[in-house]
């Protein structure tokens, strides 16, 4: 900010040829980005056959940018001027394309007529925002870098939002589309709401009822919850011992906890498979319930240890003086103080257990005890329509996402509580 | 007094840690040792089901009246073709009112119980044991079905896992196979580029969100999606998304002219690239799984880097402003040096975890089209080819390479983790 103020002090003319050129460049890039997004959205969401008129987008954008550069007062273009420029560009586009922008075959009220002004106003705003508070008259390293970083930011946000949202949107959309619809036009991922709910959700009904996913939901929940309980009990005891009690080998143990977390699961699979088969534990849920806590315990213990270290010792000592036993102190003093940490660790463990694939895949053969991950593999190996498989994927993903959004604060705490100090 | 107190504390600590120790030892440490053991043994997947005697009971002659003969045939065999069963014993519950008539020294009847000591059976052994019984009135009175109880047959068999037969053949087979070295190379490519990719994406994402704005919290939540979602769901989604026939990515790419024709991203090993007259082979499927890895794990790096960003003291930037530093200079000279610690830790952590990764590639390509890593080879050898010993040998090699990485990590990791 200090730089911008510094520049503002040296404010001179509102424009110069180089400044206009830069404004035009920013305008061209911003407009192309917006037009490209608009075109892709129209194709994906509405199934409209569009193209990206690169040349015209760049040209309009350059004009838009130059206009915004020309109309600058002090360090900024005013909002009404920006709006007016965007709307002008939109009207010109609509007129010259006969209300059919982006090479659309027919007039579309929303994606053509309404989307045009929205897009160009957005592009103008983006340009204005990109040029805000900059002195365009002097080519200055600071100014160029700031412009470059702002462009990078705009591109970065579009990029990350697309890669994060698009696959999940695709998952949901294709779970609601039949094979025929999908093959007809794979670029169209809009959802046809003009059918009965039963038709729309046929994939979910099939997967839940015919392929018994309702049962797998129960199995997965059971396995995940029991894993959380076992892990929390053992990790609380272990973490407390490691932080509060003196015993030989304590430091070595503290250091080696995380080491376990780096052991490759695939190395454990062959011996566990062999031994569990011979013990008759392999194709059972108790078998999984032995393995899962073992894989989550080290990290849970580590996270709780980090948290316990931040708790003041005095309270516990006061409790001890009052005559409580150690376990009494843990139950009455330490645990109530650590509820947020317990929530974090519990959610993290739940996520691991719910998402676990390898052991569920290797161990479970009997369909009645499948977890969701294992059930998905079963769905994949049969001649099952893709729509059903994607409905299954949504069913596996949805609970964990709901929990995640609900408790995001705790889960993020759990994810980062691995304790980063370095 | 102090001494006894310390001893009591140590004992308590021991009891509190014991369950964790036991479970971690049983499920993590012991299997690693067992894996070494198995890697030196000639064990096939089928050997896990221990050889056992099998019996079927049939009635050959049904009595009509008192003092008639009831003839029961026990069809028995050794389920294994090559393992000898020792001390085979057959037991069965007999109906009331029958007396053993056949002179069979191996069998005896006590009350209603028949028991036969059948000695040792070699591999592939079969026997039909026919026993005649004389029935009396009480047999008809009880109207019992001789087949109502299932005969029980037991034997002891050597356990293939605990005997002392060792071999080096597993390692010889794995190391001399044409697959091993390419697999190791692919594993390293996957690990290195997957790690770097996820960290770079995470750094970029953290930079984007390191500014306060409305909706920042929602954005942060969205950015974590790929990491939080179950691997099986996102892997299948990617596979469909990238499908050459009906996948949306190919269709969109062709529609907007980015792709000349549909590309089989996950199924094609190499793609020819013409770069300034140079013909290059670009490993397509491997690149796709690396991109998946970077996509799925960037949130992990993102979270840690973002947390670190927020711990950088702001006065450093203010001082740089006074010195007239440009934005990129500030990033290069202030931000990056502050991130060195977390970046190196992330690199090593992700390196080890990516090296260990199995699910992702297995679900995306199954190791086809030049994407087979060591972990997938462990599975292929042990379960697809049913050669447990060879699979364990690959796992041992993987573990040794990993141990080397871990040694490096714990030597160079920043103090206090």
Image (cartoon, rainbow, N blue to C red):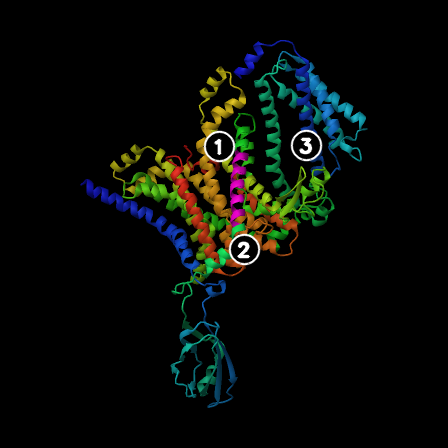
Instruction: Name the residue at 40% across, 37% down.
Output: B413
Label 2 is found on which chain of the structure?
Answer: B
Query: Does the rendering let one see residue A406?
Result: no
Instruction: Name the residue at 33% across, 37% down.
Output: A333
Farthest residue toward the bottom?
A: B67
Q: Secondary structure at mark 1?
A: helix
- When the figure is inspected, residue A384 is found, relative to residue A189, above or below; the finding is below
Where does residue A248 sit, x and y in percent of width and height? 27, 43
Where does residue A330 sit, x and y in percent of width and height? 33, 40
- Residue bearing mark 3: A37
- Point out the stretch of residues depicted in magenta: B183-202
Where does residue B403 sit, x and y in percent of width and height? 41, 47
Return the residue nearer the eye: B215 or B164: B164
Asked if disc 1 and disc 2 are in contact, CB closer than 8 Å, the reply is no
Per the rendering, the mark at residue B178 is 2
Quarter of the figure with residue A367: bottom right
């Amino acid at each position: 900010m200090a730089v911008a103020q510094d520049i503002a002090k040296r404010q001179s003319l509102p424009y110069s040829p180089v400044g206009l050129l830069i404004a035009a460049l920013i305008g061209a890039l911003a407009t192309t980005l917006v037009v490209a997004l608009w075109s892709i959205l129209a194709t994906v969401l509405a199934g409209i056959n569009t193209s990206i008129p690169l040349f015209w987008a760049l040209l309009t954008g350059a004009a838009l940018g130059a206009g915004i550069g020309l109309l600058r007062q002090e360090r900024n273009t005013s909002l009404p001027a920006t709006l007016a420029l965007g709307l002008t560009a939109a009207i010109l586009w609509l007129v010259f394309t006969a209300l059919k922008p982006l090479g659309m075959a027919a007039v579309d009220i929303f994606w053509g007529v309404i989307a045009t002004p929205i897009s160009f106003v957005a592009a103008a705003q983006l340009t204005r925002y990109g040029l805000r508070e900059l002195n365009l008259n002097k080519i200055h390293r600071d100014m160029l870098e700031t412009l470059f970083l702002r462009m990078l930011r705009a591109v970065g946000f579009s990029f990350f939002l697309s890669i994060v949202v698009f696959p999940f949107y695709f998952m949901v959309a294709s779970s609601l589309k039949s094979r025929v619809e999908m093959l007809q036009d794979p670029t169209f991922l809009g959802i046809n709401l003009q059918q009965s709910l039963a038709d729309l959700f046929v994939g979910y009904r099939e997967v839940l009822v015919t392929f018994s996913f309702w049962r797998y939901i129960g199995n997965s929940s059971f396995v995940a919850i029991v894993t959380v309980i076992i892990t929390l009990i053992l990790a609380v005891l272990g973490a407390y011992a490691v932080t509060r009690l003196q015993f030989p080998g304590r430091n070595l143990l503290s250091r080696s906890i995380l080491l376990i977390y780096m052991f490759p699961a695939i190395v454990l699979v062959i011996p566990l498979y062999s031994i569990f088969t011979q013990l008759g534990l392999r194709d059972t849920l108790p078998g999984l319930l032995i393995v899962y806590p073992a894989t989550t315990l080290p990290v849970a213990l580590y996270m709780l240890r980090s948290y316990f270290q931040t708790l003041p010792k005095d309270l516990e000592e006061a409790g001890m003086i009052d005559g409580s036993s150690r376990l009494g102190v843990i139950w009455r003093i330490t645990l109530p103080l650590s509820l947020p940490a317990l929530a974090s660790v519990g959610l993290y463990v739940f996520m691991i257990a719910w998402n676990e694939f390898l052991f569920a895949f290797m161990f479970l053969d009997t369909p009645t005890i499948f977890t969701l991950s294992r059930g998905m593999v079963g769905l994949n190996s049969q001649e099952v329509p893709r729509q059903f498989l994607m409905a299954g994927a949504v069913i596996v993903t949805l609970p964990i996402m709901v929990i995640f959004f609900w408790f995001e604060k705790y889960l993020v705490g759990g994810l980062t509580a691995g304790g980063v100090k370095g | 007094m102090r001494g006894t107190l310390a001893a009591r504390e140590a004992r308590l600590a021991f009891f509190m840690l014991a369950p964790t120790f036991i479970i971690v030892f049983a499920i993590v440490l012991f299997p690693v040792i067992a894996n070494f053991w198995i890697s030196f043994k000639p064990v096939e997947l089928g050997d896990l089901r221990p050889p056992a005697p099998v019996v079927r009971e049939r009635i050959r002659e049904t009595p009509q009246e008192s003092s008639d003969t009831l003839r029961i045939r026990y069809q028995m065999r050794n389920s294994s073709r090559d393992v000898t069963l020792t001390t085979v014993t057959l037991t069965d519950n007999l109906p009331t009112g029958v007396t053993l008539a056949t002179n069979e020294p191996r069998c005896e009847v006590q009350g209603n119980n028949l028991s036969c000591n059948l000695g040792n059976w070699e591999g592939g052994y079969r026997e039909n044991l026919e026993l005649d019984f004389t029935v009396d009135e009480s047999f008809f009175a009880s109207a019992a079905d001789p087949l109502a109880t299932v005969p029980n047959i037991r034997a002891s068999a050597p356990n293939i896992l605990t005997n002392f037969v060792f071999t080096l053949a597993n390692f010889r087979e794995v190391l001399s196979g044409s697959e091993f070295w390419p697999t190791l190379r692919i594993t390293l490519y996957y690990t290195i580029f997957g790690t770097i990719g996820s960290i770079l994406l995470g750094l970029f994402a953290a930079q984007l969100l390191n500014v306060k704005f409305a909706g920042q919290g929602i954005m942060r939540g969205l950015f974590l999606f790929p990491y939080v979602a179950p691997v099986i769901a996102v892997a299948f989604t990617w596979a469909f998304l990238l499908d050459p026939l009906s996948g949306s990515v190919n269709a969109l790419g062709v529609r907007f002219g980015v792709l000349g024709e549909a590309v089989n991203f996950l199924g094609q090993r190499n793609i020819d690239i013409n770069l300034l007259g140079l013909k290059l082979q670009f490993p397509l499927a491997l690149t796709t799984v690396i991109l998946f890895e970077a996509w799925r794990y960037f949130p992990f790096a993102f979270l840690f880097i973002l947390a670190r960003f927020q711990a950088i003291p702001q006065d450093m930037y203010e001082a740089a402003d006074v010195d007239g530093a440009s934005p990129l200079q500030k990033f290069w000279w202030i931000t990056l040096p502050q991130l060195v610690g977390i970046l190196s830790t992330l690199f090593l952590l992700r390196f080890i975890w990516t090296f260990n990764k199995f699910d992702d590639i297995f679900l995306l390509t199954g190791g086809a089209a030049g994407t087979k890593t060591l972990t997938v080879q462990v599975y292929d050898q042990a379960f697809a080819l049913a050669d447990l010993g060879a699979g364990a040998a690959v796992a041992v090699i993987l573990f040794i390479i990993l141990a080397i990485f871990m040694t490096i990590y714990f030597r160079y990791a920043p103090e206090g983790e």
